[in-house]
Amino acid sequence: MPPKPLDPSSSPRALLGAELRVARERAGLSQAELGEPLFVSGSFIGQLESGTRRMHMEYALLIDATLDTGGFFARNCAALAKSKYPNHFAEAAEAEAMAKTIREYAAHAIPGILQTRAYAREVFCAYQPTALDEVIDELVANRLERARLLDNPATPSVWYVFDEAVLRRVVASRSVMAEVLRNVANLIRMRRIIVQVLPFTAGAHSSMGGTLKLMTFDDAPPLAYVQGNAMGHLLDDPATVARHTLTYDLLTASALSPRESLAMIESMAEEYEDDRHA
């Protein structure tokens, strides 16, 4: 008999994952054995069961066929598929909310959960210059809601490497830059985040290709997320994640120390403030 429909108001991805674990164990299959007909690894099945990965319809259909669950996973997958984030980022954002640690290299802009309202609005307007105000307003609201990830004083542990270009590219205005850099500095001084700046003087570095995010979890394997313009890839292959982890470690080795980085961030904020009042 198939499980009861899930209640989308109660951690839907975790509920769907829990039902997957029950159905798999009832069928007497290991995670690796269930992964075979889906052409995925056992660790991927584990990530579905823990809720760190979203179940896409192609997998839901195969799971229903393999576990004889009467279309349960396909029905609930469709019901829970809606996201307030762009398609290329939705799964990464959902995984981010469950992460134990987040490490990110920001090549071009202040990371989303550190952005102020004015900074985020300018970024979205630049990306979608013909979008209606209500569309931009919703995007900004969703981004600011993501920032609540930092409301917990201890979890997740968050460590950034900013390219110096992130500090020097004036987004919207010098006043907006002063505000967003002060926000970053305050979070550093509160010991909520760690930030290192990769200076221009470092020259060539290990992540010349773009941004990188690494996430670890209490009950699932680590993930890496690489992003380009309107595209992103969430990666779970252990060798690939290990290679990206090395990339991040090399970035931190080339960057300024956290103390030197804070001094640079506050100095830049002061410069922007002085220009604003000049």
Image: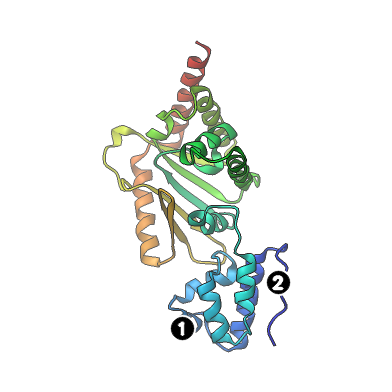
Q: Residue at x 47, y 49 (%)?
A: 103
- The reply, left or right, for residue 152 in relation to residue 109 is right
Identify whether 257 is placed above or below 233.
Answer: above
Q: Secondary structure at mark 1?
A: helix
Indicate the position of residue 278 as horizontal and vertical percent values: 49, 10
Who comes first in sequence, dot 1 or dot 2?
2
Identify the disc placed on residue 117: none
Indicate the position of residue 269 as horizontal and vertical percent values: 49, 24
Three-letter code, disc 1: Pro
Residue nearest the observer in this picture, 100 or 234: 234
Count neighbours of disc 2 (C-alpha within 10 A) and say few if under 14, some if 14 to 19, many if 20 or more.
some
Q: To which residue does mark 2 refer? A: 6
In which quadrant will I find the N terminus?
A: bottom right
Identify the disc placed on residue 37: 1
Identify whether 265 is placed above or below 58.
Answer: above
Residue nearest the observer in this picture, 45 or 69: 69
Identify whether 22 is placed above or below 206.
Answer: below
Find the residue positioned furthest to the left. Answer: 204
Indicate the position of residue 99 as horizontal and vertical percent values: 56, 56
Find the residue positioned furthest to the top. Answer: 278
Three-letter code, disc 2: Leu
Q: Check if mark 1's residue and mark 2's residue have beta carbons within 8 Å.
A: no
Indicate the position of residue 4 as horizontal and vertical percent values: 72, 78
Q: Residue at x 41, y 39 (%)?
A: 108
Q: Secondary structure at mark 2?
A: loop
Residue 241 quadrant: bottom left
- The reply, left or right, for residue 8 in relation to residue 114 is right
